[in-house]
Amino acid sequence: MANRSRAEQGVLGVVVVLSALLVWGLLSGGLGPAYFLYLLGLVGMYVLLSFGLNVQWGYAGLINFSVAAFFGLGAYGTALLSAGNSPLAGGLPPLLGLFAGLALAGVLAVVIGIPTLRLRADYLAIASLGLAEVVRLVVLNQNGWTNGSAGLRAIPTFFEGWPVLGSFPEQMPTLVVDRILVTIPFVTQFELLGIRLGTSFWQGVLNVGLVLVFVGVTYLLLRRVHRSPWGRVLRTVRSDEDLAEALGKNTYAFKMQSFVLGSLIMALAGVFYAHLNLFVSPGDLEPINTFYVWIAVILGGSGSNRGAMFGGFVVIAIREGTRFLGDVLPESFPVALPNALSLVETTYATVVSNIASTRLLAVGLIIILVMRFRPEGVLPPQRELIWPRATEEATEGPTSGDGPTVTADGGDRGADR
Amino acid sequence: MALLEYIANGLVFSSIIVLASVGLSLVYSIADFANFAHGDTMTVGAYAALVAFGVIGGLGAEILGLPLGFFVALAVGIVVAAVVAILTHKLVYEPLDIDSIGLLITSIGVAFVYRAVIQLGFGAQVTEFDIQVLRPIDALLPLGVRMTLHDVAILVSAVVLVTALHVLLQYTDLGRKMRATADNPDLARVSGIRTDRIKLWTWLIGAGLAGAGGGFLGLYSSVSPRMGFNILLVVFAAVILGGIGSIYGAMLGGFLIGMIDQLTPLLTDVGIPIGTEYSYAIAFVIMVAVLLVRPNGIASEVGS
């Protein structure tokens, strides 16, 4: 495609390079296939979280700093019903847990929304961060309900008890791929493959399939919603709330709807996480998890669902990549330096041995740098806001000079399939 | 009798919250955004004071049970916090071309950078000032109040600093300019006030107060990289309770939130099963409740 922008080419490049690294890891046996699928599941989860935040921040301009709370409520909602050591119920089917998690998050969204959505945007930021902390404290301290800091274990997989899928991983045969010795004459020789694809692999396949369904359905829903009259009102609210009011729109209702919709998507991600990780604890509700999602959205481009996908990918690369680097990098600086540069050596040693702090530093720097150099994100929403038919007509028409514009009343008319 | 003790504790904790919330409110009104790095500025002040105290030691003389060296170290903490804030303003905030929401998001990045650097330098563990813990003051024990001289020192220092800020704002040229800039930056600029310079002063004073609050918080409990971020929400609650941008409102809000926080044990005393682990949560729920009734804070008529 020749008409990609430079940013799109760059994003494509990053994705290709990261994918190539992952494939190499798989082939060389450094990355277990089951773990690879787990990572894919996490990427899907972050994409869902970013979609949710995009509905709130990207579409309607609502600063929600309680992403972790909605995510956590989704996870705890389903875990409390289905986990083996749940103090409340336990053993119930995960599908029921899905609805419980979504319901909890929906209620919390309304409760947070009522006092804050009428106020200036920064009140919502502060109040939502605070209420997220309240939720975390309740989960942490109400041992009788949530099992406290010990967390909930023995959560079944999402498909447990389903007719065919429930026993799919056990029934699939274990595939064994033998090691191959690859020799490039006179250069090097190395071993490839040598992988066993057992139950955990097939379970991973199921999980990735599940998250693909979640992401796919959400994406299609959001794309439709974003281009609908409802989505256009939201974008108006974001850019000029007074204008939306003047046009007779009840902006409070619109903001509340988008807040709840976004929160439900975050809770969906939480439900998926509970059945992917099979263990949830109050640590999953830490505020830092909220800001990972924020990075995904502002890096990808606020309001852009393509950007949200890219952002989710990058966040997992940061989270898991730094963990991987911490394991791989040597403890001390590999090259001996003259004494004058001993500062470099000590800094290096500190950075490598405190990989969690380094990750926090990277997160902070990324936020600052994105806001400084590309506040609109890497992939800001452009064409995806416009019905495809509209661009075709505009480029064919005689007045293609100032590009296509979305009409205020109904883009639907010219665009029925 | 327990009530008196809670009130005494509340006074001390309020002093710390007031120092922090006044600084936050000052920055909020003049730089015009919610600075999420304010809590971590407190942490910076606390660590600077900790290091300085380790270097200079006690210096012999004692004031209110605290070695003179602690006050010198506290001054170092104030200066370092102010310098860091001004550098951040120059390097990060000033070149930005975004609205106040963008600044707010950026300030979270700044907060993470502060905390990460502190963690890299000092580790994530909890430390304390190397100052002997004092016995409670004997004269107050019959009243059921266990309060040490250190608590009194925190209280007195906070009163001194806040009074100094009050005098600065009301009776000096700089204070008048600051109030004018907070009120209407455009009008202030056309009146010949160099608002850029006022902004620098605001960062200096606001972050300095945060540094002092951080130092006292470290003395009151302990010093750890998360101390500032943990208390940030309580400080925000105080600022919102008092009405965003109102400095006297922030004083009142800080006082109330600090009191409420320390009065939490009363709930268990009267039989409500909500323990002190929820004290921050209660402060927060109260803030949200106030927002419902009075969106502009309790001191909205008074203004600054």
Image (cartoon, helix red, strand yellow):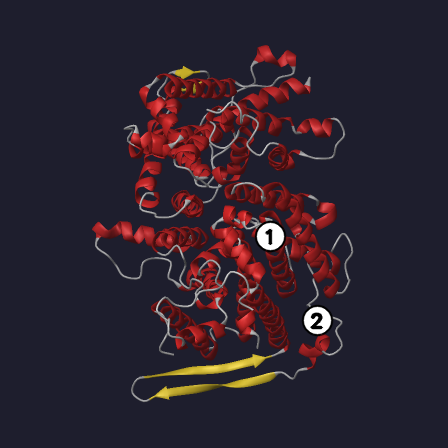
N-terminal of the two: label 2 or label 1?
Answer: 2
x, y percent for residue B155 = 49, 19
What's the residue type where badge 1 is placed? Phe
Residues B299 and A169: in front is B299
Which residue is at a point 54% across and 33% down the rendered structure image? B240
Give above or below for A195 relative to B282. Answer: below
The chain letter for the residue carrying disc 2 is A
Which residue is at a point 59% across and 19% down the rendered structure image? B8
Q: CA distance from mark 2 to mark 1?
A: 35 Å
- In the picture provided, is A82 more to the left or to the right than A259? right
Q: Where does label 2 land, which residue?
A: A159
- Which corner quadrant of the image does residue A191 belong to? bottom left
Q: Secondary structure at mark 2?
A: loop
Few, some or many C-alpha atoms within 10 Å of disc 1 (few <14, some 14-19, many ≥20)?
Answer: some
Quadrant assignment for the N terminus of chain A: bottom left
What's the residue type where badge 2 is placed? Phe
Q: Is residue A197 visible?
A: yes
Find the residue positioned furthest to the front.
Answer: A398
Q: Secondary structure at mark 1?
A: helix
x, y percent for residue B152 = 50, 17
x, y percent for residue B60 = 36, 18
Residues B111 and A294: in front is A294
Q: Where does label 1 land, which residue?
A: A254
- In the picture provided, is B173 more to the left or to the right than A51? left
**Do discs 2 and 1 share a chain?**
yes
